[in-house]
Amino acid sequence: MLRLIFLGPPGAGKGTQAERLSAIYRTPKISTGDLLRAEVKAQTPLGQQAKVYMDAGELVPDEVLIGMVKSRLQQLPEQGWILDGFPRTLAQAEALEELLRELGQDYDHVLNLEVPDEVVVARLLARGKEQGRSDDADEAVILKRLQVYRQQTAPLIDFYEAKGRLRRINGNQPMEVVQQHLQTLLEGCRRTA
Ligand code: ADP
């Protein structure tokens, strides 16, 4: 059983790699961006609230995300999970530690996908054209998300490094190569475990 956390800037490839590992290791993926977009599409009150933040490139309030992830983790005791897009703030990371303590669960690794800023901006602009995601269409919103990432999410690298749980992966390589590195890392750790 696998429990993983993906970290990295927007456009680092967290969603793509989380999806691939989810299929290979038959482990449910929890993507907070996808969950929020589904709420927006269904025009739920939560979705209507979240859309304002997402369109501005801001983070949706911590309470909303913590509640969302909590209810899902409570339902997945045996299958494990792959978190994509959560935690994104120190408050979320602390809440996750506490929740996992309550549930008697632990994560195996925190996978940090490293990609330079200019590569991320180019990828997000391309995704905006292909997928019509409104938060990817506007360069100002992309730059805002990067700024939010640096201020609020990047400190999580030190948080998990201090716990000795961080694994760094070069995300500036073809998707297949990144996937291969991730699999090697996961399987190497299993064999020695
Ligand atoms: P990105 O490619 O920017 O990483 P995501 O699909 O993960 O995109 O997230 C899209 C948007 O959803 C974010 O810009 C943010 O507004 C909101 N969001 C997703 N996850 C979280 C979270 N853990 N905390 C707060 N907001 C979040």
Image: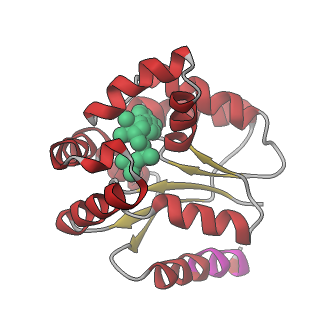
- Which residue is drawn at the image coordinates 57% and 78% (left, top)? 185
Name the residue located 54 percent from the left edge and 43 percent from the top edge. 34
Foreground residue among 169 and 13: 13
Residue at position x 41%, y 29% from top? 91
For image coordinates 34% across by 42% down, the residue present is 134
**Chief SS of the magenta region:** helix
Identify the image quadrant of the N terminus.
Answer: bottom right
Q: Position of residue 139 (x, y in %)?
A: 17, 50
Position of residue 61 measured from the top left corner of the image (x, y, whole percent): 40, 22
Q: Is residue 17 visible?
A: yes
Describe residue 36's horizontal placement relative to residue 114 as left or right: right
Q: Is residue 189 magenta?
A: yes
Q: Where is 77 relative to 62, above or below?
A: below
Residue 71 found in image quarter? top right
Residue 154 in picture, x, y percent from top left = 29, 49
**For the view shown, which residue lies furthest in the top direction?**
45
Observer-nearest residue: 94 or 26? Answer: 26
Ligand 1: give its quadrant.
Answer: top left
Q: Taking 78 as reference, is 126 left or right?
A: left
Q: Which residues are magenta?
A: 185-191
Q: Quadrant of residue 53?
A: top left
- Apparent side of residue 17 relative to residue 71 in the rendered image (left or right): left
